[in-house]
Amino acid sequence: MSYTFENFQRDLARRLVLELPPEERLRGLAPEERLRGLPPEERLRGLPPEERLRGLSEEELRRLRQLLDTQLKH
């Protein structure tokens, strides 16, 4: 298989992207794409507790309260 002009263009683009600052590399990516591959702990790092809890349902909050109550008693 020969090295085509399309191969050259793809390889050049990959090298040039690596030279861009992180902000420019991420430009145009949806938030979901930016976070893909990050573990939940990394996604939440730096957020205050109220921000971490914002998307939880009433049932999830109730279970969390129970868990915290149990842990605080021990």
Image (cartoon, rainbow, N blue to C red):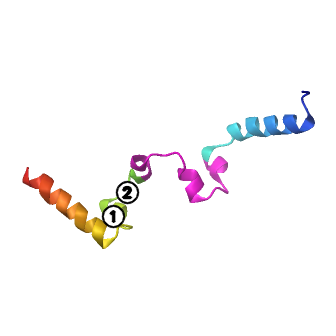
Q: Quadrant of residue 73?
A: bottom left
What amino acid does circle 1 point to?
A: Leu
Task: Name the N-terminal-most of marks 1 and 2.
Answer: 2
The quarter holding residue 12 reads: top right
Kindly state the secondary structure of the residue where label 1 is placed: helix
Magenta-span inclusion, residue 18: no
Image location (x, y in percent) of residue 19? 70, 37
Q: Which mark is residue 47?
A: 2
Q: Residue at x 44, y 46 (%)?
A: 39
69 to the left or right of 21: left
Q: Which residue is mark 1?
A: 53
In this view of the protein, which residue sits in the foreground, 24 or 49?
Answer: 49
Q: Quadrant of the N terminus?
A: top right
Q: Position of residue 54 (x, y in %)?
A: 36, 67
Residue 66, percent across and down? 18, 62
Residue 2's place in the image compared with 44, above or below, is: above
Give left or right: position of 70 versus 48.
left
On residue 44, which mark appears?
none
Q: In the drawing, does residue 70 fall left or right of residue 38?
A: left
Q: Which residues are magenta?
A: 23-43
Element assignment for label 2: loop
Q: Residue at x 57, y 52 (%)?
A: 34
- The alpha-carbon separation of the residues under discs 1 and 2 comes to 10 Å
State the residue at coordinates (35%, 67%): 56
Amino acid tagged 2: Leu
Residue 26, position as x, y percentages in the image: 63, 51
**Residue at (14%, 52%) from the top-left corner?**
71
Q: Main secondary structure of the magenta part?
A: helix
Question: Crowdedness of circle 1 by 10 Å Cα count: few (<14), some, many (20+)?
Answer: few
Where 42 sits versus 57, above or below?
A: above
